[in-house]
Image (cartoon, rainbow, N blue to C red):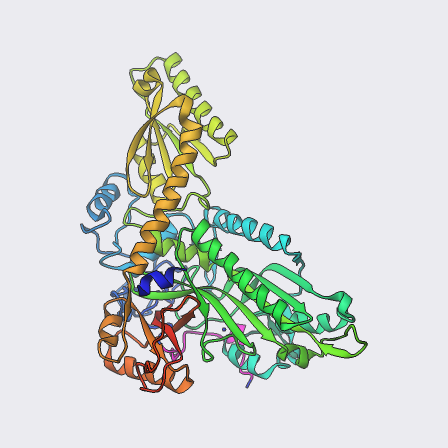
Amino acid sequence: MVVDAIQRVRLEGVRVHDVEGDVDDDDGGVGRGALQEPDLAPRSGIPHLSRCGRPEGFDVRVGDEAGVGVRRRGQVPDGSGGGGGGGGGDNAKAKKETGLGLDATIEDDFGAWYSQVVVAGELIEYYDISGCYILRPWAYSMWEQIKDFFDKEIKKEGVENCYFPLFVSSARLEAEKDHIEDFAPEVAWVTRSGQSELDVPIAVRPTSETVMYPVFANWIRSHRDLPMKLNQWCNVVRWEFKHPTPFIRSREFLWQEGHTAFTNKADADKEVRHILDLYRRVYEELLAVPVIPGVKSEKEKFAGGLYTTTVEAFVPATGRGIQGATSHCLGQNFAKMFQIEYENKNGGRSMVWQNSWGCTTRTIGVAIMVHGDNKGLVLPPRVAPLQVVVVTIPNSKLSAEDSKKLNDTAKAMSDGMIDAGLRSKLDDRDNYTPGWKYNHWELKGVPLRCEFGPRDMEAGHCVVVRRDTGAKETVKLVDLPVRAKEMCEEMQADMLKRATEKRNASVVTCTSWDGFVEALDDCKMILTPWCETKESEELVKKKSQEDSDGGAAKTLCIPFIQPPLAPGTKCFITGAPATTWVIWGRSY
């Protein structure tokens, strides 16, 4: 029943050139047990992540005196191969035969697996600045699919794209006290130009409220100027200390940030929920990742905002929730700070109501974690850079004429699927064996593989293999474009269905403290009745950290779709009257 119901972010900025190492994490377990990279350059490893727990110790040492060698670019850390669910044994065999497979498995060492798969799957390249990553075309293409979908949808609502500067003056950054206090530890500062110290340090934007809103005050004069709806696709820098992880937690990342202004709260509220539903669609319709829409607690809401809504995803392999995207109602707080007021219809002066909302390249990391297996990436067809790859199976006994006919037919197959709207490619490289190609494209997560050899050519068909299940289907060449599209849609739906079933099985209900930590340590999210006080939230954090080695629990969200709350229901931690149901868990 509960599962059924759940289904319907003092100025102490960091100077960039002064930063070294990490600081202690004290955020209720967000960073504990999270994936991280070693402090080596180039970076290519994440320490062992025991399931639902903290990462084991990882010494940041370089050279022979530390007993380890310096890793070279593209080299992956040693992992624990072997069998287990998800193809561990097949994976070890693939590694031996082709050199393409992964050493680590999801079951034995999720952190090492993730570290390897993002590199071996050609999504990222590590950089010589910790927390910064090169997005390779395979990853950037996925981001473009998300960008194209979301950009089209927000333009239907009258949102216009723009671009504001990367740099922020300290005066603007300090204008909103609560806002900057939350971001202060993550702010990077430019303090020098060449060999000269700047008279006034300049911040690199961690978000753009304080960049954009002084200009809003100039542009908004009358009620006729409203609503104002702006969005920018850009990068931001947050000098993250909590275990930098590719896509999940990085010091520079790509995102979109929308900033809008309205004459009234009702219109602002409506947009908050509409944008949040677009984020839900990004995850569920594009990435095949189920999310729980809800509102953040007062403790977890966006600093300086009125309230924050969120879509929360979950990674069953580690038992951790992850904030997918957020849509904030800022109320009139920033309007007061930056004097964004207008002449209303009655000739008087009124303050605007504002929203901000954002979604990042974290989306890619979530999809990798939820869908990947021990053979590599498993990409949802709607965001996969390639949806179909055609691989020929040559035969040394073929005549030159027949070899040409095989390749020409394979190219026609791929071209036909492209004409049908699929992203397809013919892999006709003659310096690799078919087996090598199979493993290569499996590692990169291509949804469908078309195997085409001489016998297939004679029979007028090919064998199509699904990446997610390995299921094979013989398809007539004449039917291939239509059937390949159908198979992509079937795979997309099946991936969401499987992920939803796993997520639902990871939600348990507790009405008292008894069993809470046990469920947490069993990689679950916990739904509880709650009194919605900051003191009780801190108490849960403290007690869960004391009672378990796996890290503290935090509120993930108060889901919009609530199970019935019977009169007299008590808060599970304080015994005070409960006012809502809330989902707790460990989080990235």
Q: Quadrant of the N terminus?
A: bottom left
Say which residue appears at 34% left-offset and 51% top-offset.
371
Q: In the rendering, at what x and y percent does residue 184 appear?
A: 53, 79
Q: In the rendering, at what x and y percent does residue 540 appear?
A: 33, 81
Specify the segment rendered in magenta: 11-28
Among the 4 quarters of the image, the one containing residue 456? top left
Relative depth, front residue between 261 and 463: 261
Q: Is residue 535 magenta?
A: no
Q: Is residue 217 above or below residue 406?
A: below
Q: Is residue 281 above or below residue 467?
A: below
Say which residue appears at 76% left-offset and 71% top-offset.
218
Dominant SS of magenta comes to loop
Among the 4 quarters of the image, the one containing residue 547? bottom left
Q: In the rendering, at what x and y percent does residue 46 appear?
A: 33, 62
- Tell me how many marks there are: 0
**Residue 375 visible in the displayed image:** yes
Say which residue appears at 70% left-offset and 74% top-offset.
214
**Residue 194 visible in the displayed image:** no
Q: Is residue 342 above or below residue 359?
A: below
Q: In the rendering, at what x and y percent does residue 436 appear?
A: 31, 35
Relative depth, front residue between 501 and 220: 501
